[in-house]
Image (tube, rainbow, N blue to C red):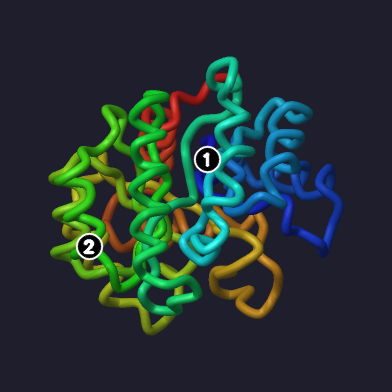
Amino acid sequence: MELIDSHAHLYMLEHADIDTVLSRAADAGVSTMVTIGTEQSDWDLNQKLGETHKNVFYTLGTHPHSATSWEKWKPQLLGYFKSGVPRKCVAIGEIGLDYFYDNSPREEQLVCFEEQLELAKTLDLPIAVHCREAFADLFEILNRVGAPNRRGVMHCFTGTTAEAKKSVDMGFRVSFSGILTFKKAEALRDTARALPLDALMIETDCPFLTPEPYRGKPNEPSYLPLTAKVLSSALGRDLESVVQQTSDNARAVFSLSS
């Protein structure tokens, strides 16, 4: 079985060197990782990780927490695509809206998201979406501006079942993190059960959201099988079929190849 960690922040891992992290991931059956861009300071780091490790791909984007800096950072982000899409850049992300923390004014979040959505459409790339307590505005923008042809993924999903189903109806996959393993996350497991398997993906979002039974420790890709096992149990399906389908879904979303 080959698992794909569809959303990791490998450049943030400080508890072990990258070669050790990748070795442990391989031993755990995690064959491929997508390391996610969130702000100007990590774009070059992600690109280097993708260029130097065969099984690592990357995204570029500005997180809604940093939307205030979008206008200042935009020229640099556009510069990565001056000669086309870099070979191992597989999406624009992590982009979206966050009304839970409101680290940036909502008006600036909306502009930041909409302009990066337009960029993804121009480049024919999917999007990796962060959304917390903002699905009404997110769906409004996606309907008004239009989603990319290749759609993308609602990462680390924690919304309602209705929001998950609407995301799937719009052509997006829905990705679950280690939160799925938490004892009090039965509502989230119910949401997973309500969706078709060909719409599901899994991720670590490392170094955050370490799954049970390792909560409190830094997360890393080698822990992804724990989430896969809980998902398979929640769905009442065998582990191998769940791993196969979620990996196929990630490959389809990001057009992953070696």
Residue occupying image coordinates x 45% and y 54% = 228
Residue 138 in view, yes or no? yes
Q: Position of residue 245 (x, y in %)?
A: 35, 37
What secondary structure is found at the residue carrying circle 2?
helix
Q: Nearer the viewer, mark 1 or mark 2?
A: 2
Name the amino acid, label 2: Asp
Name the amino acid, label 1: Ile
Q: Is residue 184 above or below residue 217?
A: below
**Crowd around label 1: few <14 · some 14–19 · many ≥20 (10 Å):** many
Judged left or right of residue 146, residue 61 is right
Q: Is residue 81 above or below residue 17?
A: above
Viewer-proximal residue, 81 or 226?
Answer: 81
Q: Is residue 70 above or below residue 103?
A: above
Residue 221 in view, yes or no? no
Q: Position of residue 225 (x, y in %)?
A: 54, 53
**Crowd around label 2: few <14 · some 14–19 · many ≥20 (10 Å):** some
Residue occupying image coordinates x 34% and y 52% = 154
Q: Which mark is residue 137?
A: 2
Locate the C terminus and report the quarter of the image it occupies: top right
The count of marks equals 2
Q: Which mark is residue 4?
A: 1
